[in-house]
Image (tube, coloured by chain):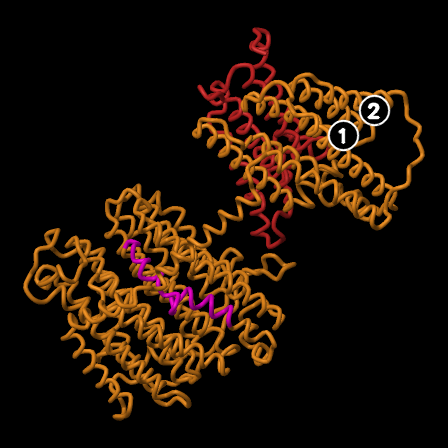
Amino acid sequence: MNTVIFRTVAPFLTALMVLFSIFVLLRGHNEPGGGFIGGLIAASAFAIYGIACGVQPVRRALRVHPMSLSAFGLLLACLSGLPSFFSHVGFLTAHWVYPEVFGVDLALSTVIVFDTGVYFVVFGSITSIALALEERESD
Amino acid sequence: MALFGVDETVIAVLAPFAAALVAPTAVRMFWHNAAWLLAIVPALVFLHFFSYVGAVSQGQTFEEGFAWVRGYGVNFTFYLDGLAVLFALIVSGIGTLIILYAGGYMKGHPQQGRFMSFLFLFMGSMLGVVTGSNLLTLFIFWELTSITSFLLIGFDHLLAASRRAAMQALVVTGGGGLALLAGLLMIMNVTGETEMSNVIVSGEALRNSSLYIPILIMVLLGAFTKSAQFPFHFWLPNAMEAPTPVSAFLHSATMVKAGVYLLMRLNPVLGDTAAWITILPFFGGLTLLVGTLLAVRQTDLKLILAYTTVASLGLLVMLTGAGSEVAIEGAVIYLFAHALFKGSLFMVAGLVDHECGTRDLMRLGGLRKAMPITFLAAVLAALSMGGLPPFIGFIGKEMLYDGTWNLADNALLLTVVAVLGNGLMLAAAFGVAFKPFLGAPTKTPKHAHEGPVLMWLGPLTLAFCGLAAAVGIGWTGGSLIAPMAGAPVHGDYHLIPAHISAPFYLSLITIALGLFIFCRLDAVRQIMARVLKAIGWGPDRGFDQFISLVVRFAGVFTAIVQPGKMQVYMNTVFVVVALALLVPMGLYGEAPSMPAMPDFHFYEWLVLALIVMGVIAVLVARTRLIAIVSLGIQGFAVAVLYMLFGAPDLSFTQFMVETLSVVILALVMTRLNLSAHDNRPFRETISHAVIAIAGGIGFGALLLAVTQVPFDSRLSDFFAANSRVVAHGRNIVNVIIVDFRGFDTMGEISVVMITGLAILALIRVRKRGGKKEETPPGDGSLAPVSDAKPEVAP
């Protein structure tokens, strides 16, 4: 697998896949997609990068430990339940706002925050497992 | 009263938790002076609860808070009456002084911020216990105090003794907490109420219930472990491993009184039965005597105080169970006095330890010149503890003698126990307060001098409060004590006894007895030491034996169910799965009928053929790697099938799961250095094949059977109708995951993360162990992936 072509293409492929995973995450509410699938795509993106270029470059590229990303995701998911606390409705009840940014109507909600949390948890957990497995004893 | 739509009491209970978050930053910015800033929080909480005193003393009660989990009757509600308010005042008032004291005591400690943070976490939890109304919320706060106590006792986690003491306290109080949970659930079951405010007015419901005795036992287990009643008292002296601010705050003034609080709280509905007025005075009295006897045996200032705390708690339990209103009032006033003088004396002990480097009574002496302020605080507090006028301790003692002397049953016995206990207590108090300060100066590890203002402010304030509360007994009694005792305002408290009666003579006897023992303290100590040596065994040793028994049992049990052989696990799991699927179907004749062959398009046939080919490829593959990749063929083909039959989300996920499974399996294989070929002997291959085929047939039959049952479309209809309208999403699958059933997803992602952490730990263990182990991480690494599958199933 350690071919020149693979090693050259891998970073671009990874970037593209990460981008795609974000796209999949954001469209999830109306089209096939969502945080789970997005997270899996992002995890495979970094798995590819790891197989091609080794574990250290992936760790450098991520900057933080993937497990921290996972924990961040869980925190995000929990926090998305907080607004319902203040409006005295059931925990995790969805809240929507429709701000107008540059003339475009945006539909923002606590649901997308929650889904982003799911994305990070799945991405972080699977990436840390994959990276830990890819690491050789000598690393 | 409400602020931003949230009741102020809710904010007051949550404020310490917020302070816990900022405490480390504050300490990093202002060093130990951050204590002045941080103390504002509990001071404000104190003021908040103080504002209720007037109304509560008129007999008013308040219910605040909001509904939390409606379906289960779990609410975030608070109930304020005299009992709750006085406890909240003690917690926040002493808490303020303790925060200041901790600022001085832990000055320069690298973990001071964390320490402050833990103290605040405890304070919030304790406020929750004493004001919480909902039984389940109360339980959560109750366990939180156990956990924060664990963190604080084990604060010096590098010391083995600290770790042991912390673990012991957690096992004893946490275990008692579980018993309490059982008791609370039974109370909820019997009364049908989830709020304490409703439970305590439920009248005879609990007493007449057939569950009365189980409820009583469970509640008492919770209360006795928390309040260190004999034979659970051993954890409290061990908890003295904690830094002194913790001992002063948790293990004398507040947390250990939680059990007493609970008993007083439930007294109206559980009390006044034969069991109640037998069990409580028996264990309380026993604890009082054991505690005081063990106290005079010690020479360590903190240990003396710890055992006298055990004794005082015993006294409180005894009075609570005595079954008379006067006794309860005696208990309340003594509880109040105890919080003041014991908090103060503990801080004095810490101050002496801090400035002299030792707290051993044998090595201390003549400190009155070097530490005059500390000496003053110690004397004032000890006079109150000894029950001398004009201190609040004296009034408490008069009141409790009045209570025990006029009891219907066992009056003489309880009075004798109380007199003996109080006499010994006075001797111990004087030992702590006078021995280190009087006599000739001794050489101490550190050069003794007066402590900083942060440190003497607390003990001095509390000691003077003990004096002021007694001088202004009219107000103290009417506003704090009587409403807490739940009695209509008596106003019958006197600093100077109105008439000479039995309690006064009993006081005289107590003081004489105490002074007599104090003068012969060394002799008494030696006698006690000899007695204890003769007995040899104690509950502390028993705890160790119990723990080692549990560990040995766990070892044997684990060796049986977890032999550590992967093959055994896999075989067991799949055999059980196959049996669970096939046996009921055979027994109940639920086997599905063979369906008619549907009309497939040619491309559907193609995909089916691909699946079969993939499976065959797995079976005939020459190396393991080829087998793993071939498994992918079958998986991808199934994903295509999902796509064709209109489940794009499922198909999407299946694609990703298959990709990652193949990648991770391949990685696991290379990592485990498995041989490339499958080397199973023929017999094993056959038995595995039988298990696999049985499992496959089982699942196939189950799916067929399920599809042959008429389809209930209620849920599908609901989601189809509401997904767009209510949740603003067209993708029903996603809407279900993140919105309608968001809480489930929350649980699932928590599992994903914990699994990830566990696998990471497993891989690390392998790495550190170096050599190959029989725990392939690959076994668990599929868990989050396979979790994802049911997740998206529509």
Between B638 and B69, the one lying in front of the other is B638
Q: Residue at x 91, y 41 (%)?
A: B593
Write down which chain is painted red: A
In which image quadrant can residue B543 be found?
A: bottom left
The disc labelled 2 sits on which kind of residue? Leu
The x, y position of residue B760, in whole percent, is 51, 32
Q: What stretch is highlighted in magenta?
A: B217-243
Between B184 and A121, the one lying in front of the other is B184
Task: Specify the quadrant that holds the C terminus of chain B.
Answer: top right
Between B107 and B303, the one lying in front of the other is B303
Residue B50 visible in the shown view: no
Residue for badge 1: B648
Q: Residue furthest top?
A: A4
Task: Residue B608: give its label.
Answer: 2
Q: Earlier in the sequence, mark 1 or mark 2?
A: 2
Question: Which SS class for mark 2?
Answer: helix
Q: Chain B's shade in the image? A: orange
